[in-house]
Image: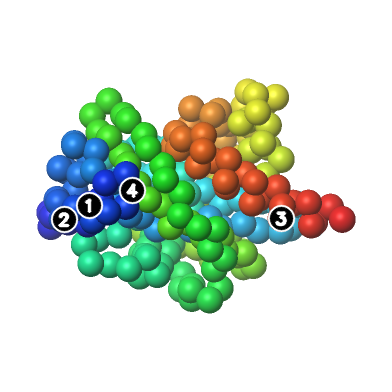
Amino acid sequence: MTKEFFDIFDADMNHMGVAERNEVHQKGYWHKAFHCWFYQIENGVLNVLFQKRQHDKDTHPNLLDITAAGHLTAGERPHEGIREVEEELGIQVQMDELESIGVISASYTGDTFIDNEFCYTYFYHYKEHMEKIIPDPVEVAGIYRIPFHQMEGLYNGSLKSINISGFEYKNNQLTSLRTDVELKDFVPHPSNYYKVIFDKLSKINKVLST
């Protein structure tokens, strides 16, 4: 497997050098990432698209996560991260179609890794059918669509579980599915990260209801 190298930073985003991916996550160096959230509006309902991470990912396997995301490798600039959309979802998107919501500092400590990221975060209004997304089976196990009001219910505790629709690879074929999920089935991004995401989604939803 080809090794990945990331630019590393201190908590104030001062550049410290370059390190290999495993070292970055072992020592908790700050590094940069590209995050792109897809949303859809259907019959007046705001939906958010989540990818399901593959079972063999080194972090958060089998969990639901940002529609398309990835680390910026050494020397890459934030806008170059848009390659993740095509690599993971099989569709082309241009930077001028995305809405930037800034850089979010996100820190998470797992059992075997420390992930400190400066997340260059974007939203994309996806207007095609979800079935036009052909996820890369190496990276992504499937795609699910979740109404925003149900996500709010999970995160504020008013709902313990929700039933969601999407598709996953089964025997190398994309298969439509419905499944029940709980909060534990989502990547545990820190609360400050999700607050920014939910605030943005709430503004979009408010416009729909006026």
Where disc 4 sits, the SS reads: loop
Marks 3 and 1, the one that precedes in the sequence: 1
Q: Which mark is drawn over residue 204?
A: 3
> Are there few (<14), some (14-19), or many (20+) residues within 10 Å of tag 1?
many
Label 3 or label 1, whichever lies nearer to me, is 1
Left or right side of 84 for 75? left
Label 3 or label 2, whichever lies nearer to me, is 2
Left or right side of 112 for 38? right
The picture places residue 52, in percent across and down from the top left corner, at 44, 45
Q: Residue drawn 62% across and 44% down?
A: 198
The picture places residue 164, in percent across and down from the top left corner, at 61, 40
Question: Disc 2 designates what residue?
Answer: 17
Do the CB atoms of the residues marked 2 and 1 lie less than 8 Å apart? yes
Q: Which mark is drawn over residue 8?
A: 1
Marks 4 and 3, the one that precedes in the sequence: 4
In three-dimensional space, the C-alpha distance between marks 2 and 1, rounded to whole angstroms, equals 6 Å
The picture places residue 88, in percent across and down from the top left corner, at 39, 60
Q: Residue drawn 80% across and 56% down?
A: 208
